Every structure is written in C-alpha cells, then in structure tokens.
Image (tube, helix red, strand yellow):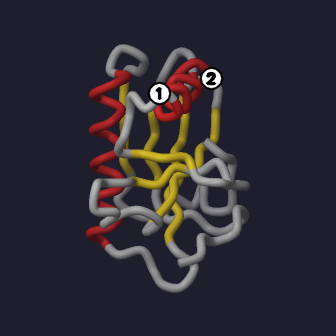
Amino acid sequence: MRQKKLNFKKDMAIYVTTGNPKKLHKGIKDAINAGEIQTWKIDGNGLLTHCTSTDQWEREAWFGCILEENRIVFCINGREDRALTVPEYAIYHGRFVEMLLTHFDRDFSDIQVSPLIDSAYDRCPMNEI
C-alpha cells in the first residue's frame, strides 16, 4: 500500500478551535513520540495514521494539518490505489476526536467534523503533523 503524495486533494477535515494551535500541535506530536498515545503513529512523511494491535486500520488513511490563527485543521487523505470508504472515514475521524478528548480536552474549546468535502481545504498543501 502506497500513500498518496503530499500535495493531493483532501476529502474531509476536523476543525479544532484552540487559543494556541502551535502548543496543541506540539503536544500531539510529543505525546505520540513519547508513547503516551499508542493508537496513532507518525509516518516517514510526518503524517498521522491510526494503528491498533491488529494493524487493521494502519495506512488506510493519513491526517496532515494546517495551523491557522485560532485553530488546527486536520485533513484526511486516503490511499492512492482506491477511494476512502465511509467506514474508514468514520473510524479515523471518530478515533482522532476520541484521542483529542482523552489527552487534550483542556487545550481546545471546540471540535467540528465535516461530513463531506470542504472546498476551502481541497487544494491546500499538505503539511506534516
């Protein structure tokens, strides 16, 4: 399974409102790298993929992010060889929001998840997590 290149179209997004996007971004990376979060890993391109003990969901999709003034937009990207399925979208978004609520609930004020393509972020350059 190959991951798509870093400059392709995003399908959906998670919008996290926070007073300090850089701090939250760093906190997520640091917690994953320290092993405090074991259900997400940062791949060789700096993108997040969901992982479990059975590898069921690993490398099915990836999150990159865009840091804005008062929020982080996490954009999901599917595999190059096929379209992202609705169950994959649901698992990745649900588990990512679960991770944020479990580990960073005091670091943001709101989370929104788009159900469909968001044209405002369709062609944004992919940034590593």
Q: Amino acid at mark 2?
A: Lys
Q: Percent from the top left, x then y, of residue 95?
A: 29, 47
Question: Which residue shows up at 27% across the image and 38% down it?
Answer: 98
Task: Identify whether 72 is placed above or below 3.
Answer: above
**Along the line of sight, which residue is nearer the eye, 75 or 50?**
50
Answer left or right for 47 relative to 91.
right
**Along the line of sight, which residue is nearer the eye, 95 or 75?**
95
Question: Which residue shows up at 34% across the image and 24% down it?
Answer: 103
Question: Which residue shows up at 49% across the image and 30% down it?
Answer: 28
Answer left or right for 122 relative to 15.
right
Q: Percent from the top left, x then y, of residue 82?
A: 48, 84
What is the crowding at mark 1: few (fewer than 14 residues within 10 Å), some, or many (at least 20)? some
Which residue is labeled 1 in the image?
Answer: 31
Secondary structure, mark 1, is: helix
Q: Amino acid at mark 1?
A: Ala
What is the crowding at mark 2: few (fewer than 14 residues within 10 Å), some, or many (at least 20)? some
Q: Percent from the top left, x then y, of residue 12?
A: 46, 59
Between discs 2 and 1, the one toward the N terminus: 2
Secondary structure, mark 2, is: helix
Question: Which residue shows up at 55% across the image and 32% down it?
Answer: 29
Report which quarter residue 44 is drawn in.
bottom right
Task: Identify whether 1 is placed above or below 8.
Answer: below
Toward the bottom, the furthest residue is: 81
Q: Quadrant of the C terminus?
A: top right
Report which quarter residue 5 is drawn in.
bottom right
Frontmost of labels 2 and 1 is 1
Q: How many marks?
A: 2
> Distance between the Cα atoms at labels 2 and 1?
14 Å
Which residue is labeled 2 in the image?
Answer: 22
**Along the line of sight, which residue is nearer the eye, 17 or 44?**
44
Task: Identify whether 59 is placed above or below 42.
Answer: below
